Amino acid sequence: MSVQSAAADVDVDLRQLFASLARNWLRIVLVTLVVTGLAFALAWLATPYYKATAKLEIGSRESEYTRPPGTNDDEKPILDEQGVATQVQIISSPDILKQVATKLNLDKLPEFDETLKMSALGRMLVLVGLKSDPFDIPPEERVLNAMHDKLNVYAVEKTRAIAIEFASKDPKLAAAIANGIAEAYIASKGDAKLESNAAATDFLAPEIADLQKRVKDAEAKVAAFRAQSDLLMGGNNAVLPTQQLAELSSELSRVRASRAAAEASAESVRRALQNGGSLDSVPEVLSSELIQRLRERQVELRANIADLSTTLLDNHPRIRALKSQLADLDGQIRNEAQKIIRGLSAQAQTAKAREDQLVADVNTLKAASARAGEQQVQLDALQRDANVQRQQLESYMASYNAVASRKDRRYSPVAASLIASAQVPSQPYFPKIGPITGAAAAASLLLMAIGTLLGELFSGRAMRPAAGARFTDIEQVAMPAARVEPTVAEKHDEGRAFGPYGEAAAGYSIAEAELPTPADSEPAEDRATAVEASEPSESMPEPRQSRLGEIDVEKAAEKLIASGAARAIFVSPEGDEAAASAVLVAREVSDAGLRVLLLDLTASGAASRPMLDSGLFPGITNLLASEAQFSDVIHPDLFSDAHVIPVGTADPVRAMRAADRLPIIMQSLTTAYDLVVVECGAADAHGISRLVGDGTEVFLSMLEADDQVTQAAVKLIENGYPDVTLVTPVGHEPPGTPVPGKRSAA
């Protein structure tokens, strides 16, 4: 007796599931035909309805020749979405519909008043209480309710146009009602404008008469106050005292500056004379012509003394005479400087007297200017009041003239126009026999197919044991596990399902390739291998034990996590099929919570293609050829949280010219990720030398323990990699298939 170990050990047999559609095809077709026939009959017998559409444009219709003075179209607000929606509600309002119903006598038609021609079924429903009695509703309300049910008013998207749709059994009536609603709306807008114009004239006429009187009184007050205050206006529209005060203030400032300059000059000359300093630096002394001539004579005498001193002694009469003249010149210069001081002092005193006079005049004008300012303020207030009232009077008179002319001529431009009148429809919009029949056929066929598939699923007939499902025989728990050889068809199906690694993995179990020795293995219950076939096989050979001491994917992942390795280099001497080890180990480490990146350096992309389901992504060749950046070549694995850099789409020859950049790229990747897994394919020790760095583990991936694998391992050990580890993917799910309990592509 066998029991299933978990619900995840069964899968849906798609072939069996969809085969149920073929087995029940007759029932599906019959139900579809019946539903299609019923839909066709109902659509054929249904009363046809015709729909007519009229369109209105909402916008200004004012002409530039009739527009009031001082206004233009730009000053009028353009209706936004809310404004157009408001007009939609106005069009469908009961007032508009009542006008149309009265004009077209809709209350006389059974289509709008069911009490005129009620069917026997309707009367019976009213009697049993399943339908409200239409006689309880007023006739006018019954007509409006019927019109609302058949009316559809909406704003055309992204325009200021409104469409009015009306459906009726009579196509002519449908067009007449749609056009009637549009015309009633335009007429109501025109009547509203006429009423607005009449109300405006009634308001403006007495206001204008009152304003004329107030303007006359205000202007009279301005004239009387101006005559009483005797305000004289000067230049710059200022009163005369204020203007004189400004001029005297400017003159006072100039006189004060002149006095200060004269006093400063006299003080500088006086200080130079008292301190015995040179007068050459004083501007007033230098500007004196007499002093300049004395200075020139002084320079001449000093030059003569210097010339005679070369031949005569200091006590010579000529030398002494010249020095006496020089002393007299110095005295004359100082006397002239004293005169300059007295002149500057006199000038300062004159300026001081002028300043005192100006100060007195300014004080007098201040009082006069203050009085004039107060009077000017009162005058300005009266003038402003008169101007405001006059402007208001002019504005009212202009508006009154414009409104009165429109009222007399009954001119009321409506901000709406009929851009498309409703035409009599030739084809009914309901029912559409073809679409209704087709939709019924498609829906019934789809529902029958879904019902058949669900029935097959719930019955359990479409379920089969999952790939790798484990079943335990209660009577044989202690017996050694055996491998059952699959059939040729099963091998073929598994090879197709597993993609590039299917041929290597199909038909093998964990016991056949990676069962450890009893000394190093787990308990016997964990070493037991699952029986993969539903029926026992006659030949059950003993599982083959490897002689190279390889480890499985789980142990390789545990070794990398425990050692804290930053790089894992995988060499696959048997070709692309063995590259599954790198993918499986990367996913195992990623599932443990580490950040893992797989770098595919195989020529065919055997490691990255199962992780991305495509070989057209940019990758390491694009990065080496400077055609992409890191963010462009790093992609997420479809079946785990790991990341992958595929081979890429660039020219491999061009990319290999920059192979010296691989150490730099590896260093950058190890900085960003906890572990970088590199699948090198059938590379040798020299080929992986650029990829090795601190914290590197070298693995040799194998499918079978043959001489090729042994020679590759020996060469790696002899060339400086004594710690090479053999790992095998045999017995694990191929990389291209999602694992239960882990993230899948869906």
Image: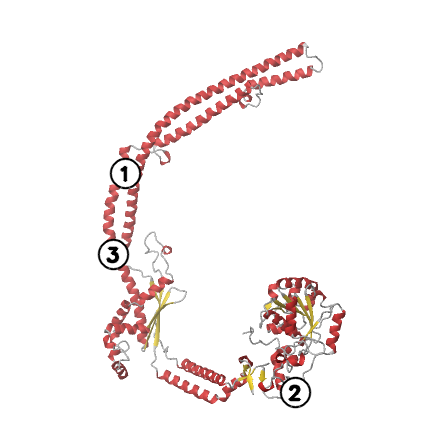
Residue occupying image coordinates x 50% and y 85%: 460
Looking at marks 2 and 3 on the same chain, the residue that comes earlier in the sequence is marked by 3
Residue occupying image coordinates x 71% and y 68%: 688
Whole-angstrom CA distance, mark 1 to mark 3, is 35 Å
Q: Position of residue 700 (x, y in %)?
A: 70, 73
Closer to the camera, 92 or 141? 141
Q: Describe the element under mark 2 as helix, strand or loop.
A: loop
Is residue 198 left or right of 583 when viewed as pictured?
Answer: left
Identified by mark 1, the residue type is: Val
Indicate which label's residue lies in the foreground, 2 or 3.
2
Closer to the camera, 417 or 728? 728
Q: Describe the element under mark 3 as helix, strand or loop.
A: helix
Q: Describe the element under mark 1 as helix, strand or loop.
A: helix
Looking at marks 2 and 1 on the same chain, the residue that comes earlier in the sequence is marked by 1
Q: Which mark is residue 199?
A: 3
Tell me how the rendering is colored: secondary structure
Identified by mark 2, the residue type is: Met
Q: Which residue lies under the disc numbered 2?
A: 540
Q: Quadrant of residue 30?
A: bottom left
Q: Quadrant of residue 320?
A: top right
Is residue 231 left or right of 710 when viewed as pictured?
Answer: left
Q: Position of residue 46 (x, y in %)?
A: 34, 82
Task: Assess whether mark 3 and mark 1 are in contact (beta carbons under 8 angstroms).
Answer: no
Indicate which label's residue lies in the foreground, 2 or 1.
2
Is residue 685 left or right of 643 when viewed as pictured?
Answer: right
Q: Which residue lies under the disc numbered 1?
A: 222
Let me know if residue 180 appears in the view. Answer: yes
Closer to the camera, 394 or 701? 701
